[in-house]
Amino acid sequence: MHIAIIMDGNGRWASKNNLSRNEGHKIGSEVLQDIIEYAKELNIDYITAYAFSTENWSRSTEEVSGLMKLLENYLARAIKKARSENVKVRVIGKKEGLSAGIIDKIDKLEESTKDKTGTCVTFAINYGGRDEIVRACSNILKDMKEGVIVNTQISQELISQYLDTSGMPDPDLLIRTSGEMRTSNFLPWQLAYTEFYFLEKMWPEFTREDFDEALRMYSLRNRRFGKS
Ligand code: FPP
């Protein structure tokens, strides 16, 4: 139902191929587009991709501005395509820190696709899982003070409702490329019972066949959710 992806290894792949890191990200964005198309063909309900983390700001100015330009162009193209596609787009992460141009495109894209019933594609932009939890707690506190929430105990359901992913099912499968075996502050709350699939390939080398293989491996897992 829901697949989350950490698209890692663009930089290493680019250096190996004598390209700039930003060229690696550009190819990475094309691979992501193809995998989204494939996920739509497979009728996967949700696909969530980690495009830019709250920690990525510490990269070089050149890389950060290249990534921001890439994201803005990608969002602009998605707005044009949105009318003819049955895809719902969501963006999770913190708006503060993003340019007005990007925020405007995110708002337009979310608004114009909100009633679509097909695959929900979520981009994590300026996203950090701990930051998301802190923002959720602050908003709960604010709503309690303002009387929006009354007589409500803090519960897992309440916290889930205040996360950026509110209303979405938790990911069933997380795919991470490049051989790194960690989650890097991506969806820490939501990945509690998610199956992980790590592969050595760098993200620009990732193919539909690799996606098939991840699904095949997933189908062999026995998900017990803590039960016996
Ligand atoms: C990790 O590779 C990748 C990123 C930090 C950015 C991911 C972004 C994209 C694939 C393209 C933009 C996305 C959209 C939605 C247009 P890395 O740079 O950490 O690679 P390295 O570990 O080899 O250095």
Image: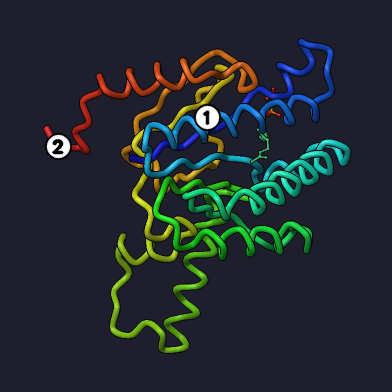
153 or 218: which is nearer to us?
218
Q: Amino acid at mark 1?
A: Ile
Dot 2, how many residues are within 10 Å of its Cα: few (below 14), some (14-19), or many (20+)? few
Instruction: Name the residue tied to disc 1.
Output: 35
Q: Residue at x 43, y 65 (%)?
A: 162
Ligand 1 within 8 Å, label 1 CB: no
Residue 192 in picture, x, y percent from top left:
35, 42
Colour scheme shown: rainbow
- Determine the CA span between mark 2 and mark 1: 33 Å
- Could you tell me which secondary element the residue under label 1 belongs to? helix
Residue 131 against residue 197 in the figure, above or below: below
Quarter assignment of residue 211: top left
Q: Is residue 176 left or right of residue 96?
A: left
Q: Amino acid at mark 2?
A: Lys
Quarter of the image with the C terminus in it:
top left
Q: Ligand 1 is located in which of the four quadrants? A: top right
